[in-house]
Every structure is written in C-alpha cells, then in structure tokens.
Image (cartoon, rainbow, N blue to C red):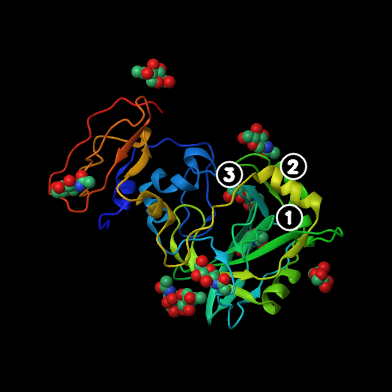
Amino acid sequence: MLAILPSNIFFALTFLTFSVSASDCLFGTHLHRRQSYGYSGESGPTNWHDLDPANEACGVGNFQSPIVLNGSTPFAIQPPFMTIPQVPSANFTNVGATLQVATNGTTIVDGEEYALRQFHFHTPSEHRINNEFYPLEMQMVHESVNGSIEVITFLFELSERGETTELLTSVIQNIDKVEHYGNSSVTGPLNFTVLIDAVQTQPLYTYNGSLTTPPCTEGITFFIVSNPLPIDVATFNALKHVMKFNARYAQNYLGGSNLLEVVSQLGDQGIHISFSRLCCKCAEGFGVDFVEAGYPGGNSTDVVLSPNTSDSGVRKRLPSVKFRV
Ligand SMILES: *[C@@H]1O[C@H](CO)[C@@H](O)[C@H](O)[C@H]1NC(C)=O
Ligand SMILES: *[C@@H]1O[C@H](CO)[C@@H](O)[C@H](O)[C@H]1NC(C)=O
Ligand SMILES: *[C@@H]1O[C@H](CO)[C@@H](O)[C@H](O)[C@H]1NC(C)=O
Ligand SMILES: *[C@@H]1O[C@H](CO)[C@@H](O)[C@H](O)[C@H]1NC(C)=O
Ligand SMILES: *[C@@H]1O[C@H](CO)[C@@H](O)[C@H](O)[C@H]1NC(C)=O
Ligand SMILES: *[C@@H]1O[C@H](CO)[C@@H](O)[C@H](O)[C@H]1NC(C)=O
Ligand SMILES: *[C@@H]1O[C@H](CO)[C@@H](O)[C@H](O)[C@H]1NC(C)=O
Ligand SMILES: *[C@@H]1O[C@H](CO)[C@@H](O)[C@H](O)[C@H]1NC(C)=O
Ligand SMILES: *[C@@H]1O[C@H](CO)[C@@H](O)[C@H](O)[C@H]1NC(C)=O
C-alpha cells in the first residue's frame, strides 16, 4: 500500500543527536566513514537509518545482515582460498563499536582476489544458526580492488573443557590497554592456521547481505563457518567486558521487507518517530503528507505521521516546534 516508503522520511529527518560511541566495522575499506552509532537507545540499531542520510539502507534495505541461517541457506560450493601471513604482532584498536585487529592477507573467491583489511568481534554473535546464537562472532573483512566486500565469519562456543582458539588468546594479550574508545595497542603473535583450516574444510554458509553496521551497505558476500570454534571462559569474559553488547538484531529473510518498514506499515497507524527528530523541512519535497500530526497521549514526545501514497500534491509543513531532546 505504501508506494512512498518511510525511507523518504528517514532520509529527510536530519535533526540528529549523536551518542558517544563512534566508529564502524569498515575500517580499512573504502566505505569507512567515521560516525556515531551504538547498540542501545536512540543510537541503537532500530534508529541507525536516522543518524545519517547515508545510512538509509539500514531502514529500507531488503538484503540486510545479520540473518538467521538455516537448512535453506546454501553452502559455498568452493571455499574461499585464504592466505594470511603469521605476524609477531598486529595493531589492536578499540574503535568504539568493536575491537579490531588490522591484518594483511589475501583471499581468492571465485577467482577474484580480496585483500584482508581487518577482523573484529561481536558479542553475542550476530548470525544465528537455526535461531541459536553463539557468545562470540569474529568477522574478517576483505575488499577487492574494485571495492567489492566479502566477510568471512567465525562463531565461537564456550568450551566446557577449557579448550580455546589460541589466536584469540594472543589477540587479547593487551586487552587491558584498549578498554576505551580510541585506545590502541598490539596483539601477541598471530597464527591463523586453525581458522584457515576451518574455512578450507568445513561447510560454509553463504549469502549476499549487508554490512551489519552503518551504513548497512548491501552487496556484501558472507561466508559463515558452520561449526563453532572453542573459546575459554576467561577469554570470552575479557572480550565481553571491553566490547559490551554489540550485535545488530537478526534482519528479515533475504528479499523480505526491512523489518523497520514492516513495523511502520501496520495498517494506517502511521509511523511513530521521536519528536526530537522533527524539523519543519521534513515534509517538503518528499511526497509525504503529514496528515495526522498530533500529540498522542497529550504531553508526549512522539508524533504520529501517516505517509500518504495517494498524494494530492499538497505538501504540508509541520509547524515549527519546540522540542525536548
Ligand atoms: C529458513 O528460514 C526461511 C526464512 O525464515 C524460511 O522461509 C525457510 O522455510 C527456513 N528453512 C528451513 C529449512 O527451516
Ligand atoms: C600490513 O602491511 C602493511 C604494509 O605493508 C604493513 O605496514 C603492516 O605492518 C602490515 N600489518 C601486519 C599486521 O602485518
Ligand atoms: C594502530 O591503529 C590506530 C588506529 O587506526 C592508529 O592510530 C595507530 O597509529 C596504529 N598504530 C600502529 C603502531 O600502527
Ligand atoms: C569486480 O571485478 C570483477 C572482475 O575483476 C568482476 O567480476 C566483479 O563483478 C567486479 N565487482 C564489482 C562490484 O564491480
Ligand atoms: C585510553 O583512552 C582513555 C580515554 O580516552 C585515556 O584516558 C587513556 O589514557 C587511554 N589509555 C591508553 C593506554 O592509551
Ligand atoms: C601455527 O599453528 C599450527 C596449528 O596449531 C601449528 O601446527 C604451527 O606449528 C603453528 N606455527 C607456528 C609458527 O607456531
Ligand atoms: C552473491 O552475489 C554474487 C555476485 O552477484 C554471485 O556471484 C553469488 O552467486 C551470490 N551468492 C549467493 C549465495 O547468492
Ligand atoms: C510536559 O512534560 C515536561 C517534561 O516532563 C514538563 O516539564 C511539562 O510541564 C509538561 N507539560 C505539560 C503541559 O504537562
Ligand atoms: C491521502 O490523500 C488523499 C488525497 O489527498 C486523502 O483523501 C486521504 O484522506 C489521505 N489519507 C489519509 C490517511 O489521510
């Protein structure tokens, strides 16, 4: 029913409040832009589209990540071929939204060469398998010469026998020095053999989705190692303590409407958006009639907007309002 999608609104509402958390999982790639977003409150994933017009895909994209993987998700026919040199140490940085290690390496996917830029972590996992989540996910971000991005992802399961993946122990060697945004230190020696072996030998779920952080760009190829690797409790707790919660919620099935649009299209109930996002320019030029502006519940900071597809051509301006942030 809505030919004029909330994207227009998302795009138009430019009055922003920024949180302290800054950065993204694109560091080292051409898509990297410094920006503010977080994982809770108004800077959280349900509002990323509203933090910056460039984040539009977060609110309207139909191929968004992460997703719930299941028996219908295809496995890669041929695994990516990874070559990552062992290094005595690598840069380990708290980039706000995650902890990140800058690495070099080369991965061949379908004959195309991708450079490994970095890997970073999410607690809990962003991807789920048959709806089961894992305590930790590690995403290795690669970029090809023409800018295609490919992500190889590992899930980690807490070991009941104290087993762990040595790479992680070495990564967090100086984790106490990167407790705050902007802190940078170095890892211990990095040996990727176990991870490369997993990619080369285990079934890999694959799908084309998006960045799991703003700007949620689509056209990103994911490979997810289907069997989790072990992590010991101490390593997991150390990572969790510094990173905090940093997983985007599972998105709709591939090709399905963006869940934020689904929520905003509940009948004619309109879209609830924070009053602090409003400005009088919003309605102009975007084919949206704000036919039902009001204050539900009286002294509320919300206003109800009804996008109107059978646009009469009359574009109303919202009254200039004094709002509370
Ligand atoms: C996997 O999830 C998709 C999307 O929710 C669903 O359509 C499909 O039936 C599921 N497949 C299996 C095998 O559960
Ligand atoms: C990656 O390569 C760059 C350029 O050669 C080098 O400066 C950097 O130290 C390398 N990083 C690692 C972790 O080896
Ligand atoms: C590590 O990365 C941070 C953030 O990009 C940078 O500021 C710092 O100079 C790097 N340190 C080294 C030793 O390369
Ligand atoms: C990148 O270049 C390769 C060929 O080198 C091509 O197959 C691929 O489609 C290109 N990707 C993009 C996003 O242009
Ligand atoms: C980490 O960042 C905090 C906050 O910016 C700063 O006070 C502290 O000195 C930094 N620590 C190191 C080891 O750089
Ligand atoms: C790297 O790890 C593999 C697997 O654990 C091991 O066989 C190999 O000896 C390690 N390489 C070095 C240089 O320690
Ligand atoms: C992802 O997109 C690429 C490029 O369009 C295509 O070659 C590949 O088959 C797609 N993968 C899946 C799992 O759909
Ligand atoms: C509306 O709420 C604000 C903040 O809670 C309060 O200061 C103000 O008095 C309220 N106004 C009315 C008319 O209730
Ligand atoms: C949408 O616009 C049409 C034509 O201007 C109008 O008749 C209709 O009442 C509007 N719909 C809503 C929900 O206000």
Q: Point out which mark residue 171 bears.
A: 1
Q: CA distance from mark 2 to mark 1?
A: 12 Å
User: Which residue is label 3 attached to?
Assistant: 96
Q: Earlier in the sequence, mark 3 or mark 2?
A: 3
Q: Earlier in the sequence, mark 3 or mark 1?
A: 3
Q: Tell me where residue 197 appears, x and y as whole percent.
A: 73, 75
Q: Earlier in the sequence, mark 2 or mark 1?
A: 1
Q: Residues within 10 Å of mark 2 (few under 14, many from 20)?
A: few
Q: Point out which mark residue 87 bears.
A: none
Q: Residue at x 64, y 39 (%)?
A: 180
| Amino acid at the residue labelled 2 | Asp
Q: Quadrant of ligand 6?
A: bottom right
Q: Of residues 246 and 167, which is closer to you in this image?
A: 246
Q: CA distance from mark 3 to mark 2?
A: 15 Å
Q: Tell me where residue 37 appears, x and y as whole percent.
A: 49, 44
Locate residue 264 relative to residue 124 in the image: left or right: left
Q: Of residues 283 and 138, which is closer to you in this image?
A: 283
Q: Tell me where residue 134 appears, x and y as whole percent.
A: 68, 58
| Amino acid at the residue labelled 1 | Val
Q: In this rendering, does residue 178 appear at all? A: no
Q: CA distance from mark 3 to mark 1?
A: 17 Å
- How many callouts does the rendering have? 3
| Amino acid at the residue labelled 3 | Gly
Q: Is residue 57 above or below residue 227?
A: above
User: Which residue is label 2 attached to?
Assistant: 176
